[in-house]
Image (spheres, grey):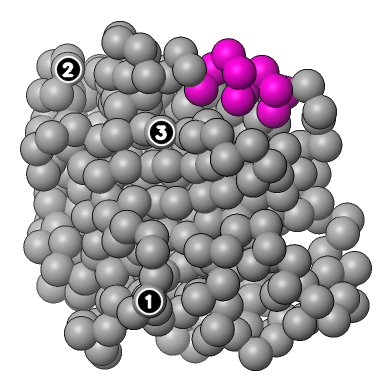
Amino acid sequence: MTLQIGIAGAGIGGLSAAALLAADGHRVTLFDQFARPAPVGSGLVVQPVGMAVLDAMGAGRMTRDLGQRLDRMAGDEATSGRRVLDVRYGQTPERQGLGIHRAALFDAIHRAAIRAGVEITPEHRATGRDGRYLHFGARREGPFDFIVDACGAGSPLSPLTARALPYGAVWATVPWPEDSRLPRDHLSQRYRRADRMLGVLPVGSMPSNPGQPLAAIFYSLPVAHHPDWLDQDFEDWRKAATDLWPAFGPYLGWIEGHAAFTFASYSHGTLRRPWDSGIAHIGDAAHRASPQLGQGANMALLDARALQLALRQARGDEALRLYAGARRWHVRAYQTMSAAFTPQYQSDSRVLPVLRDRVLAPMAGIWPVTRVLTRLVCGDLVPPMPALTPRRGKACVRAV
């Protein structure tokens, strides 16, 4: 049975849901607020569970070609020089992360959506919903058999009220310096206690220039201090950042001022029921967290895949109940772990960094904690959607 499906929001989650559902033969209309759908943000990490979804929609090969394989996440404390984060991925390609620029990932999924026959309607900013209809200011579109809310944080269709987190980050994308001492297959970070974090994420290359490797660089700071950072002389900040982490200096050589950076703030919250009659909420419209575990885009991909699999087994609200039930425990587990880990790396606490450095970091090098951390970053410490893919262990990734 072919369904008429309306999707609001052409981010990673909305595009993925559109590509997957259209590939199953449904008539999908994707609405986006911009004149031309485009990504927002800098670099991200696609984990093994996310790659399985991209493979299912036919976007995996292009994603791998443009991205940079990651074998490890590593971080040092600036004052002591102590290694306080050391998480290794698995030994096989299907158990490794992939750093990629959001624009490159967007392009791969966008191509998959076009191939699947998705109708993309630009310049339509969703403002509300009335039963089977979507509202765009004075206009409305529909009727749809059901609606997917992929509008992201601040969605006008979602009842989620999230808690703003006190820390955010400024991001920029730069060419990978030839004189860099950092490994190109690591996400590298340096911390000053928990109130400052600098990071370098290899993100592969862009479709327009596949020969130029890139890095996403970021600097964590309290949200309330962002105006002060903008007022600070940029050269003074550049020197302070380089003093804190000399290996960071070559990446700042491409930057001329504050305008090269984009500020990102974060929030935390989860809908207890990510659906209502005729509508499913996915991605940030359903659950939001800090990027500390590197799971944001992957959670949206998993939501899209779960929705596709649920509609293969049921119709109407029964399919939406199945979607929500399949994702419930994975979402709750990772939201809980994000809430627990984030203050250790982004907070004003003086106690948590000591606990992190002197207790948790040494434990992380002991089996079986090492294996647990590997599965944590891979995204399948908890099965992503057990009700729809009931196999466990490494097979969870392949079954997604």
Q: Which SS class for mark 3?
A: strand
For marks 2 and 1, the one nearer the N-term is 1
- Residue 316 lies, in percent from the top left, at 33, 35
- Residues under labels 2 and 3: Cα distance? 22 Å
- Residue 217 lies, in percent from the top left, at 52, 66
- Residues under labels 3 and 1: Cα distance? 24 Å
Q: In the rendered view, would you say 368 is above or below 173?
A: above
The type of residue carrying mark 2 is Gly
Looking at the image, which residue sits at the far top?
A: 368
- Residue 201 lies, in percent from the top left, at 42, 59
Principal secondary structure, stretch drawn in magenta: helix
Instruction: Please say if the residues under marks 2 and 1 sit with CB atoms less than 8 Å apart.
Output: no
Q: Which quadrant of the figure has residue 264?
A: bottom right
Mark 3 lies on residue: 86
Mark 2 lies on residue: 393
Residue 179 badge: 1
Report the span colored magenta: 352-361
- Does the segment drawn in magenta span residue 104? no
- Residue 31 lies, in percent from the top left, at 45, 71
